[in-house]
Amino acid sequence: MKRWIPFVKSDPTVAVIRLQGVIAGGARGALNDQALGPIIEKAFSRGKPVAVALEVNSPGGSPVQSSLIGSRIRRLADEKEIPVIAFVEDVAASGGYWLAASADEIYADPSSVVGSIGVISASFGAHELLARQGVERRVYTAGKSKSMLDPFRPENPEDVLRLKGLLEDIHANFVDHVQRRRAGKLDAQADLFTGEVWLAQKAQQLGLIDGIGHIKPMLKERFGDKVKVRQYGARRPFLARFGASVVHDAIGSIEERAAYAQFGL
């Protein structure tokens, strides 16, 4: 056991927070503010780290949870005056890029997928299927918009227009976040907010990331060979580790694979 000696400078420590998976509230996603909040707080507070590193590997998800997690990171970084560096693995897309942009600097592997600064809403229509099966669905509401975009009723153009307005507002929030966090770095001539994705080298040219690099060698280069890494990340619930939620885990796994598959992963 290493003993603490007064007035002797200790080796620098970097807190590493792993952010992997789909971003969603409750049990649906691997990443949400309720689960990550205490972990992020501990990473910034324990042992006076010289920096906090984010290992980001996420295809995105909930814009609200992305904002909550990102805001918590920024609040603690500003309060404690600790620099934050993000390292992208396979993908930092949509909400995943929102999290990466919460850092002061972003680095990625040459083959990392970055971007997708856009908003999407997907659903289905089953009213014709019900009609063919002779099923009559009865819905009663108070408030004309209460059954907006009901998948078991024909699509209403007014509902679609209303939904597009909501998506545009969320998109504007996303764009504002990126422009504030990457101020002075973004390519002013490029259209970066269409939902398109790029590999790391092109993303660097566009100003979406700061460079190409991996976490261990970059931390050693910046803080010295004796830098210590302290890992933090969300853990699976106790019973889930023993297969106690097989069905839920299977559905979650399918949803997560589908999210990653959008980017060829």
Image (cartoon, grey):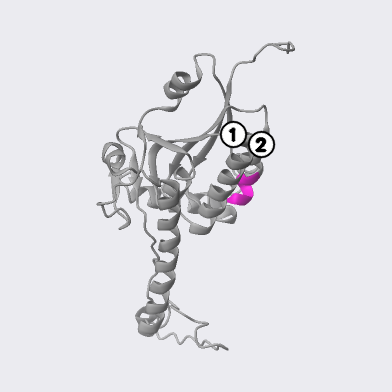
Q: Quadrant of residue 77?
A: top right
Q: Position of residue 27 (x, y in %)?
A: 58, 53
| Residue at the image point whose x is 33% and y is 51% from the top | 262
Crowd tier of the residue under label 1, counting other residues whose Cα lies within 10 Å: few below 14, some 14–19, many 20 or above: some
Residue 229 horizontal/vertical position (percent): 56, 24
Residue that numbered label 2 is attached to: 42
Three-letter code for the amino acid on which mark 2 is drawn: Lys
- The residue lying at 51 percent from left, 52 percent from top is 66
Q: Position of residue 33 (x, y in %)?
A: 59, 50
Q: Looking at the image, which residue is at 37% across and 36% down? A: 210
Q: Can residue 223 be spotted in the picture?
A: yes
Residue bearing the label numbered 1: 232
| Residue 183 on image: x %, y % | 40, 47
Left or right: 200, with 246 as reference point: left
Q: Work out whether mark 2 precedes mark 1 in sequence or the reverse, and give the earlier one.
A: 2
The C terminus lies in which quarter of the figure? top left
In the rendered image, the residue lying farthest to the front is 184
Q: Are marks 2 and 1 in contact (CB under 8 Å)?
A: yes
Q: Quadrant of residue 235?
A: top right
Callout 2: few (<14), some (14-19), or many (20+) C-alpha neighbours within 10 Å?
Answer: few
- Magenta stretch: dominant secondary structure: helix
In the rendered view, tell whether residue 134 sits above or below residue 18.
Answer: below
**Would residue 95 be seen by someone viewing this image from the given angle?**
no
Q: Nearer the viewer, mark 2 or mark 1?
A: 2
State the extent of the magenta-drawn residues as a range. 32-37
Task: Give the CA separation, mark 2 to mark 1.
Answer: 8 Å
Residue type, numbered disc 1 = Tyr
Under circle 2, the secondary element is: helix
Q: Nearer the viewer, residue 170 or 141?
A: 170
